[in-house]
Image (cartoon, rainbow, N blue to C red):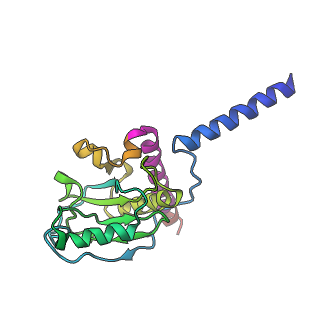
């Protein structure tokens, strides 16, 4: 009976572990809210992607996905910069996170980016690359997203409750995976909270 019970326990543990990975939970994170490595490649000031307008007080961080599977952070940054010539649309983001976790800054945090509609004036936007149509981020992208978001929260005296999706502003399915999987979105915000707390504890102990 003891052996049978042990086997059942092992099976349950394995199943829960698989479910955790599938549902977007269970990522092995060791992330705090320290400033991540950022490749600053500011867009040219132009009316289509970097208007040079100063923001109001920042009250939120908005998470997006590129909706362009397989594209890199550099691809998206260059696309934004090229809008001054193509005039295809008005679009940009303050940051873009790539498939390997690289972070490119496109617009200063004190300037408006064309990303979040009615919230452009009081938010900082983060665009995330993704490998396929599900919109799920790689582990590297996710890790950088947690750290960057937590750092920005501390920079602007915000909490995880001030982090929102583009979806929460307009109803647009963006970022897709976090709209389709509310549990993954809740876990992301919890990971941001944990990262902030880690840094605050370090500062208190210094």
Residue 175 higher or lower than 92, as above or below:
above
* 186 in magenta: yes
Residue 27 in picture, x, y percent from top left:
56, 51
**Front residue of this view, candidates 87 and 155:** 87
Residue 90 figure quarter? bottom left
In the rendered structure, the answer to whether residue 95 lies left or right of residue 17 reads left
Q: Residue at x 59, y 54 (%)?
A: 28
Residue 26 higher or lower than 53, as above or below:
above
Residue 143 in picture, x, y percent from top left:
50, 59
Q: Residue at x 25, y 72 (%)?
A: 81
Q: Residue at x 37, y 41 (%)?
A: 179
Q: The magenta stretch spans which residues?
A: 180-200
Residue 171 in picture, x, y percent from top left:
25, 41
Residue 141 higher or lower than 168, as above or below:
below
Mark yes or no: residue 50 visible: no
* 153 in magenta: no
Residue 116 figure quarter? bottom left
Q: Residue at x 41, y 73 (%)?
A: 38
In the rendered structure, the answer to whether residue 49 lies left or right of residue 133 reads left
Residue 181 in picture, x, y percent from top left:
43, 39
Mark yes or no: residue 15 visible: yes
**Front residue of this view, candidates 39 and 80:** 80
Q: Quadrant of the N terminus?
A: top right
SS majority, magenta: helix
């Amino acid at each position: 009976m003891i052996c049978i019970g042990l086997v059942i326990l092992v099976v349950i543990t394995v199943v829960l572990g698989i479910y955790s990975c599938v549902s977007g939970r269970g990522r092995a994170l060791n992330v705090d809210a320290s400033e991540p490595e950022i490749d600053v490649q500011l867009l040219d000031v132009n009316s289509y992607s970097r208007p040079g307008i100063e923001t109001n007080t920042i009250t939120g961080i908005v998470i997006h996905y590129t909706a362009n599977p397989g594209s890199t952070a550099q691809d998206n940054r260059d696309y934004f910069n090229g809008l001054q010539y193509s005039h295809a649309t008005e679009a940009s983001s303050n940051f873009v996170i790539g498939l390997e976790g690289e972070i490119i800054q496109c617009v200063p945090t004190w300037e408006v980016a064309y990303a979040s509609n009615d919230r452009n004036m009081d938010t900082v936007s983060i665009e995330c690359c993704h490998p396929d149509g599900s919109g799920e981020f790689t582990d590297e992208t996710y890790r950088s997203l947690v750290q960057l978001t937590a750092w920005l929260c501390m920079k602007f005296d915000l909490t995880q409750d001030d982090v929102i999706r583009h979806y929460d502003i307009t109803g647009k399915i963006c970022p897709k995976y976090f709209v389709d999987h509310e549990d993954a979105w809740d876990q992301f915000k919890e990971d941001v909270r944990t990262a902030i707390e880690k840094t605050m504890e370090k500062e208190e102990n210094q």
